[in-house]
Image (cartoon, rainbow, N blue to C red):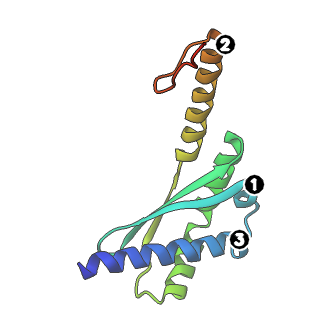
Amino acid sequence: MAQGRRVERVAALIRKETSELLIHGIRDERVHQGMVSITEVEVSGDLQHCRIFVSVFGEQAQKDEVMDGLEAARGFLRGELGRRLQMRRAPEIVFKLDLGIEKGTTVLHLLGELERERDERGDVTEGTELPDNP
């Protein structure tokens, strides 16, 4: 049980420090092409591997540039994390593009379109009552 809490604490610290390094530490212009945020960090139980999920706001070309920049800065980030977290061995880092926010936006857009279509047709949605006509 204590091992699980330690992994969670390390993941939270990695997220915090990586966010700080994205803002102030990485000088690669590719990383600053779009609005970048870290959505989640997963750390293995032995603290040797780390997956950092990144959300990038922008066009697909910008996302590709940001991911290329992050891959290029991976060694620098690993070294800095090892120093800042005072870990004997910093975990191997793998960056993954998180598309969850985009998928959520797409679903909301589709729901909005569906609602407009229902309004145009005059359909009544479930759970709503028709007004009484005296």
Q: Please report whichever mark, 2 or 3, sits nearer to the chain's N-terminal start.
A: 3
Relative to 82, is 42 above or below? above
Q: CA distance from mark 2 to mark 3?
A: 47 Å
Give residue 25's position: percent from left, percent from top. 69, 76
Query: Which numbered marker is on residue 23?
Result: 3
* Of pointers 1 and 3, the one earlier in the residue sequence: 3
* Residue bearing the label numbered 2: 120
The residue positioned 71% from the left and 41% from the top of the image is 59
Compared to 108, does 69 lie above or below?
Answer: below
Task: Report how far apart the C-alphas of labels 1 and 3 lie in the structure.
Answer: 12 Å
Residue 133 is left or right of residue 52, and the answer is: right
- Mark whose residue sits in front, 1 or 2: 2
Q: Which mark, by number, is residue 58? A: none
Q: Which residue is mark 1?
A: 33
Asked if the residue at tag 3 contacts the one at tag 2, i.e. Cβ–Cβ closer than 8 Å, the answer is no
* Quadrant in which residue 77 is drawn: bottom right
Q: Secondary structure at mark 3?
A: helix
Badge 2 amino acid:
Glu
Q: Nearer the viewer, residue 132 or 14?
A: 132
Q: Residue 3: x percent and y percent?
A: 27, 79
Which of the two discs, 1 and 2, labels the residue nearer the N terminus?
Answer: 1
Please say if the residues under marks 1 and 3 sit with CB atoms less than 8 Å apart.
no
Residue at image x 23%, y 78%? 1
Position of residue 31 measured from the top left corner of the image (x, y, whole percent): 70, 60
| Label 1 environment density (alpha carbons within 10 Å; few <14, some 14–19, many ≥20) | some
